[in-house]
């Protein structure tokens, strides 16, 4: 063998050993030969390995049966095949919390981490061994020496969190926000909840987003103004999307929040479920479901992190006394004023600049109308003063509570009414 031929032979040997895991120019198995030998298995699996080679399959469909559309489908199938060559990469889940590992959130997190690892992975000697389009369906199979497939860094639980934190800071859509809330650190929860509140508000209505974020409602919601609430039987039959939409119409309703929280519980999204349950303790309009929400929220707090739950619910006996005393002397139409009475001044409504209507020199029959048209803290305070001047302390109490809840400047009025109640 001449020196030039020897040099050519050695170069050929080096090239194929580097890229084909030991195949040589002199009759070693090629990926095409291995593919022909194991075609049935390779064409039915997303990823497989035979005789030192790793094979991966990709599919894609063309929108139209024309050459340009088929070419795009072929390219897409090839991209998917390249991604699938890493589908066998394992993730270290030994240190994962059971609450995540055993849930659907964990499954989605693993899928997201695989995508990230594929992005960090590399492959040497990749080639296409098969591609075919039949009608509008294209299939591509790629192969590479198994020794040349280098997966990304194996991710522990701590590393996984760091990767997702970085993605969240860049607003990268690796994981749905509902799922990211389940794994983020306690210090990040408020930021994630606020962002979720914005997303929910954009999709279902501003009031629904305000509830999730724990903010008072800016202006009376539709069902509040109508004084209507759906029955638990009706609410329990609704799906998650419909429950969000209902929450925008009837914000902070404990029945809606209980079943909405339950729907997230069933998805393994326990943190947002806990937050929704805790929001169901805010408006004391339905003691049965207020207590159900409180029990559910406490259970989740004990098992996870989480949302703060009010230390105690309002006095149910006092609430019933207020309703009874008020109804004996007054008859309010359905609407904001009646909801304030029936929840003993706990309606989560934000204060606003007073309008033209006021309660000065108004008769009792005008109170409900004035509150409906101008539901500000000042209006509720005037209603409280109206009843207090008539020595109707229990009628004044819910309006004084509502005024103080909406604006701190009326705390003294609340104390005055409470003091009068104790002396009567």
Image (cartoon, rainbow, N blue to C red):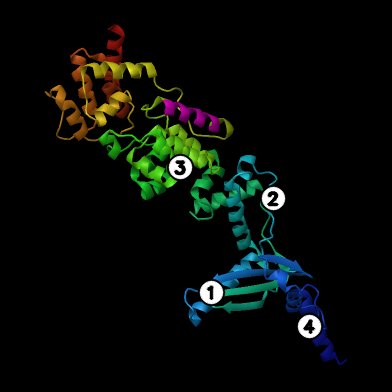
Q: Earlier in the sequence, mark 3 or mark 2?
A: 2
Instruction: Give how far apart the Cα atoms at labels 3 and 2 are.
Output: 29 Å
Q: Earlier in the sequence, mark 1 or mark 3?
A: 1
Percent of width and height locating residue 137 = 55, 74
Query: Disc 4, disc 1: CB below 8 Å?
Result: no
Kindly identify which residue carries mark 3.
193
Image-based side of 271 in relation to 58, left or right: left
Q: Is residue 171 above or below residue 150?
A: above
- Assess disc 3: are there few (<14), some (14-19) or many (≥20) residues with their C-alpha within 10 Å of its C-alpha: many
SS type, badge 1: helix
| Residue at 49% across, 54% down | 170
Q: Say which of marks 1 and 3 sits in front.
A: 1
What is the quadrant of residue 400 in the picture?
A: top left
SS type, badge 4: helix
Instruction: Give how far apart the Cα atoms at labels 2 and 4 are.
Output: 39 Å
| Residue at 46% across, 34% down | 277
Image-based side of 412 in relation to 131, left or right: left
Instruction: Give how far apart the Cα atoms at labels 1 and 2 are.
Output: 34 Å
What is the quadrant of residue 412 in the picture?
A: top left
The answer to whether residue 289 is magenta is yes
User: Looking at the image, which is closer to me, 227 or 215?
Assistant: 227
User: Looking at the image, which is closer to me, 386 or 131?
Assistant: 131
| Residue at 85% across, 90% down | 3
Which quarter of the image is occupied by the C terminus? top left
Kindly identify which residue carries mark 1.
73
Q: Earlier in the sequence, mark 4 or mark 1?
A: 4
The magenta segment: 288-300
Q: Earlier in the sequence, mark 1 or mark 2?
A: 1
Residue closest to the far top: 423
């Amino acid at each position: 063998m001449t020196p030039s031929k020897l040099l050519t032979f050695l170069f050929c040997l080096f090239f194929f050993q580097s890229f084909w895991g030991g195949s040589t120019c002199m009759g070693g198995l090629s990926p095409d030969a291995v593919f022909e030998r194991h075609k049935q298995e390779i064409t039915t699996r997303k990823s497989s390995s035979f005789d030192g080679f790793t094979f991966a399959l990709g599919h894609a469909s063309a929108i139209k049966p024309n050459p340009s559309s088929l070419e795009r489908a072929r390219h897409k199938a090839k991209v998917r095949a390249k991604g699938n060559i890493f589908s066998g990469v394992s993730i270290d889940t030994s240190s994962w919390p059971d609450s995540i590992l055993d849930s659907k959130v964990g499954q989605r997190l693993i899928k997201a981490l695989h995508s990230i690892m594929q992005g960090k992975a590399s492959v040497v000697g990749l080639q296409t061994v098969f591609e075919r389009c039949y009608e509008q369906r294209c299939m591509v199979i790629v192969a590479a020496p198994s020794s040349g497939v280098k997966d990304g860094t194996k991710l522990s639980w701590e590393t996984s969190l760091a990767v997702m934190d970085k993605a969240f800071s860049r607003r990268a859509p690796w994981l749905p926000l509902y799922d990211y809330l389940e794994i983020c650190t306690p210090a990040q929860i408020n930021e994630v909840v606020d962002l979720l509140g914005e997303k929910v508000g954009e999709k279902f209505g501003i009031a629904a987003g305000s509830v999730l974020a724990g903010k008072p409602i800016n202006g009376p919601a539709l069902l509040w103004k109508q004084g209507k609430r759906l029955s638990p039987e009706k609410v329990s039959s609704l799906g998650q999307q419909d429950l969000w939409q209902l929450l925008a119409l009837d914000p902070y309703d404990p029945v809606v929040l209980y079943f909405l929280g339950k729907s997230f519980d069933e998805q393994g999204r326990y943190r947002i479920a806990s937050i929704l349950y805790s929001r169901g303790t805010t408006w004391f309009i339905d003691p049965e479901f207020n207590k159900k929400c409180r029990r559910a929220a406490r259970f989740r707090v004990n098992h996870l992190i989480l949302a703060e739950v009010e230390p105690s619910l309002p006095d149910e006996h006092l609430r019933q006394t207020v309703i009874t005393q008020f109804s004996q002397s007054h008859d309010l139409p359905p609407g904001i004023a009646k909801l304030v009475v029936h929840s003993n001044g706990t309606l989560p409504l934000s204060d606003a600049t007073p309008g033209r209507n006021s309660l000065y020199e108004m008769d009792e029959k005008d109170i409900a109308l004035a509150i409906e048209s101008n539901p500000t803290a000042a209006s509720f305070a005037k209603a409280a003063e109206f009843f207090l001047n008539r020595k109707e302390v229990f009628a004044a109490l819910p309006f004084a509570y509502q005024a103080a809840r909406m604006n701190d400047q009326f705390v003294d009025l609340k104390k005055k009414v409470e003091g009068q109640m104790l002396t009567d």
